[in-house]
Image (cartoon, helix red, strand yellow):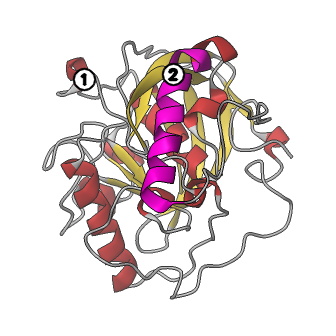
């Protein structure tokens, strides 16, 4: 998500029904077959799924997605430049914590970037991917909960905002492409209502529940500079601490620089109840 967390094999042929998840009628037509896309990312291994639809509550406490009340900075053409092939940015690279800019230009370059992100997602066996995970700090995510090229829906969300989220919280075993080989339990709201723009800049609102809601929230956190281990309990974090430290050492060995953050000494990051950072 994400990033792109890997999916447990039980969901490799996941199908959506009217009782939950994504229905094709909910999304702009662009989602039902975005031409030229060639990739996917699997958001973690999820061991369970609750498909009930609890009432949604307003996301008031976020103070504009949990970030500041100031308008997000707009991305320039330079911010959206990229070179192929795209590569997955791994923890603890500072790019994963950087502020992501709002997109206001919907052109062929953006469509090409989306196509390349899907390509990386599928090749790395994921179901979701955010732009900062490929080194581009803008508010853009792609996902396909089925995780197979040519199957399911290829969903593009630009400048997403959380409108409401369910009071009911659900525990899932998540993974992330930026944390290869690491899986752990994360508790998140079961359903969300979001506002976003599509690949052509058209605004829309959609309700998500079950796996699509989980994928969205994982990727949305990336757009807020929040990583999945920020939402883990201390007990769960302890179970993967050694693996996170190994990634920190890998970064130092590769770059010759000190790790931008260390899980061993980090203070618990305060994150909003549902999404993003606390005000």
| Quadrant location, the N terminus | top left
Classified by dominant secondary structure, the portion drawn in magenta counts as helix
Q: Residue furthest left?
A: 150
Circle 2 Cα neighbour tier, 10 Å, few/some/many (<14 / 14–19 / ≥20): some
User: What's the residue at 52%, 33% (across, down)?
Assistant: 244
Name the foreground residue: 131 vs 84. 84
Q: Which mark is residue 240?
A: 2
- Give the x, y percent position of residue 151: 15, 43
Could you say whether the residue bearing mark 2 is in a helix, strand or loop?
helix
User: What's the residue at 46%, 65% (across, down)?
Assistant: 135
Name the foreground residue: 120 vs 19. 120
Residues rendered magenta in the picture: 237-256
User: What's the residue at 38%, 58% (across, down)?
Assistant: 28
The answer to whether residue 50 is visible is yes
Image quadrant assignment for residue 94: bottom right
Image quadrant assignment for residue 227: top right
Q: How far, Cα to Cα, is label 1 from label 2?
A: 24 Å
Q: Earlier in the sequence, mark 1 or mark 2?
A: 1
User: What's the residue at 56%, 49% (across, down)?
Assistant: 222
- Give the x, y percent position of residue 190: 55, 23
Query: Quick check: is 147 in the magenta stretch?
Result: no
Name the foreground residue: 169 vs 30. 169
Query: Quick check: is 239 in the magenta stretch?
Result: yes
Q: Which residue is mark 1?
A: 11
Compared with residue 215, is residue 134 higher up or lower down, i.e. above or below?
below
Circle 1 Cα neighbour tier, 10 Å, few/some/many (<14 / 14–19 / ≥20): some
Could you say whether the residue bearing mark 1 is in a helix, strand or loop?
helix
Q: Residue furthest bottom?
A: 77
């Amino acid at each position: 998500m994400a990033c792109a967390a890997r999916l447990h094999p039980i969901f490799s042929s996941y199908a959506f029904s009217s009782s939950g998840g994504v229905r094709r009628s909910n999304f702009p037509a662009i989602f039902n077959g975005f031409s030229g896309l060639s990739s996917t990312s699997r958001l973690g291994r999820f061991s369970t799924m609750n498909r009930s639809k609890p009432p949604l509550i307003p996301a008031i406490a976020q103070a504009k997605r949990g970030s500041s009340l100031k308008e997000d900075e707009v991305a320039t053409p330079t911010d959206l430049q990229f070179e192929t092939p795209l590569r997955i940015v791994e923890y603890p690279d500072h790019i994963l914590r950087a502020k992501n800019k709002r997109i206001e230009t919907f052109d062929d370059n953006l469509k090409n970037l989306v196509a390349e992100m899907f390509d990386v997602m599928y090749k790395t066996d994921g179901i979701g991917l955010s732009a900062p995970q490929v080194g581009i700090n803008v508010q853009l995510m792609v996902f396909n909960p089925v995780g197979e090229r040519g199957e399911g829906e290829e969903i593009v969300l630009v400048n997403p905002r959380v409108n409401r989220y369910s009071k009911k919280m659900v525990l899932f075993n998540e993974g992330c492409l930026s944390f290869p080989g690491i899986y752990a339990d994360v508790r998140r709201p079961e359903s969300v209502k979001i506002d976003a723009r599509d690949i052509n800049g058209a605004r829309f609102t959609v309700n998500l529940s079950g796996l699509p809601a989980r994928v969205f929230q994982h990727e949305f956190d990336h757009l807020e500079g929040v990583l999945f281990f920020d939402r883990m309990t201390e007990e769960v974090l302890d179970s993967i601490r050694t693996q996170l430290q190994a990634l920190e050492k890998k970064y130092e060995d590769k770059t010759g620089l000190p790790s931008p953050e260390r899980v061993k000494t980090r203070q618990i990051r305060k994150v909003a109840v549902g999404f993003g950072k606390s005000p």
